[in-house]
Image (tube, grey):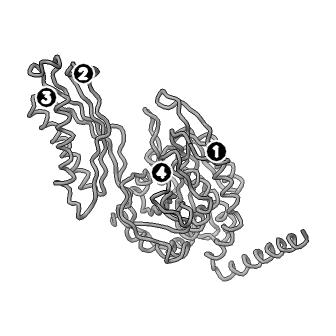
Amino acid sequence: MKIKVTTLVTIALLNTLSFQLLAQKSNYSELIALKANLIEDKVIAWRQDIHQNPELGNREFRTAELVAKHLQSLGMEVKTKIAFTGVVGILKGDKPGPVIALRADMDALPIEEINDLPFASKVKTIYNGQETGVMHACGHDGHVAILMGVAEILAEMKKDLKGTVIFIFQPAEEGAPKGEEGGAELMVKEGVLENHNVDVIFGLHLLSQLEVGKISYRPAGAMAGVADFKITVNGKGSHGSQPWFSVDPVLVASQIVINLQQIVSRNVNLTENAAVVTVGAINGGNRANIIPTKVELLGDVRSFSNEDATLIYSRIKQIAEKTAEGAGATAVVELPYETQYPVTFNNVELTKSMLPSLQKSAGIENVFLVPAMTPAEDFSFFAQEVPGLFFFVGGMPKGQDPMTAAPHHSPEFIIDDNAFKLGVIAFCNMVFDYAEMNKNWSLESH
């Protein structure tokens, strides 16, 4: 026991001495790494608590209270109930400089967790009229914990901080409940960037299929823009034994589904960008011997440029309407139907300038340029307003085969506890490094 106490005292003294020396040398990256080591257990504990108590979009009451109390304890100005449950913390450094925003999303998903963890979620709720479990199946619990850790470190380094940091804890990234607004789009609408004169914004996402200790990134279109659609095919019903008296909407809907596939294979220049057109639901009819009067199709579109999105939307409308017209039916296309997120676009010049900061955080050999990803992210709404950079932090245990790692939005999804420290370090380094650059980035590099 005497050895253990002596060791702890020695470590504490060394840490204090290191902080003083590093601060004098302005070697902030090493100081940040030391501080991140000291609060790693706290970050892990926050994440496990949030994981065990997940909340759906626009209902993150407990999570928001946890965040607000922590930011207030650090002496920050704190604003709550932004876009329903959003929390914003404002940290003003002692030196003049830019306004830098950092964002974390807080919401969970209507999924029942099947992981055997001591902090696994047992929460149940009613979603769309059905009982379901609630689970952090995308890593947002880790995002919140990481940003809480960043807030603590930067608050301790306030005297050396140039400019202001805006901590944005965002609700409803996965989408607001039906009939409600929410997420980044609503936060922008309520002025979260404009009211604080934000110059630049950074965001991160944990990935369950990227090894712990690694960072991936992509300049320009990093994640797809998405819009859902509904196509209503109106025909003429009849007895199933007499199809000649009908204008069969089931047949027309089937032809539309097939014809839509030529958009990606024949209309989009796939050498420039990927694209996806998916029909996920066909609803119509209720008996084998009745040809219905109406069939509804639900689907979504994913693309990586405004030009491709415009092309695809136009072709979906044209194909649906003309296919139906050729059969004597009609088709009504609603696009977007309920959801539309723009492309998550990383400002090209900003990404290039911040790459050394990511490499410093993880090591050059652990930072990778990757292809664009087809999932969407509503961080895109922030990056439409000010230059932004969104990157990815590994959450898969070292040595695991990515093909065996549970994907996001699955009931066995999990992030390794060792993942969070790198996120804390990367965010902190980016704040200090960007402040030192003293540059302004134009949205024109979209």
Report the residue marked by disc 3: 329
Specify whether 345 is left or right of 94: left
Precedes in sequence: disc 4 or disc 1: 1
Point out residue 150 in the picture as x, y percentages from the top left corner.
62, 62
In the current view of this chain or complex, which residue is farthest to the top?
A: 239
In front: mark 4 or mark 2?
2
Instruction: Return the disc, 3 or 1, that comes first in the chain's sequence.
Output: 1
Rounded to the nearest whole Å, what is the CA distance between mark 4 and mark 3?
Answer: 40 Å
Left or right: where does residue 75 sit relative to residue 218?
right
Quick check: marks 3 and 2 in contact, CB under 8 Å?
no
Residue corresponding to mark 4? 408
Residue name at image x 31 percent, y 57 percent: 304
Q: Nearer the viewer, residue 405 or 36?
A: 405
Between the residue at mark 2 and the residue at mark 1, the CA separation in whole angstroms equals 46 Å
Q: Which residue is mark 2?
A: 288
Q: How far apart, in angstroms, are the residues tagged by discs 3 and 2?
A: 21 Å
Left or right: residue 408 compared with residue 122: left
What residue would you read off at disc 1? 52
Q: Mark 4–mark 2 contact, CB under 8 Å? A: no
Residue type highlighted by circle 3: Ala
User: Amino acid type of disc 2?
Assistant: Ala
- How crowded pointer 4 is (Cα within 10 Å; few <14, some 14-19, many 20+) is rated as some
Q: Residues within 10 Å of mark 1 (few under 14, many from 20)?
A: many
SS state under label 4: loop
- The reply to whether callout 4 and callout 3 are in contact (CB within 8 Å) is no
User: Is residue 197 something that shows in the picture?
Assistant: no
Q: Give coordinates of residue 53: x percent, y percent.
A: 63, 42
Disc 4 or 2, which lies upstream in sequence?
2
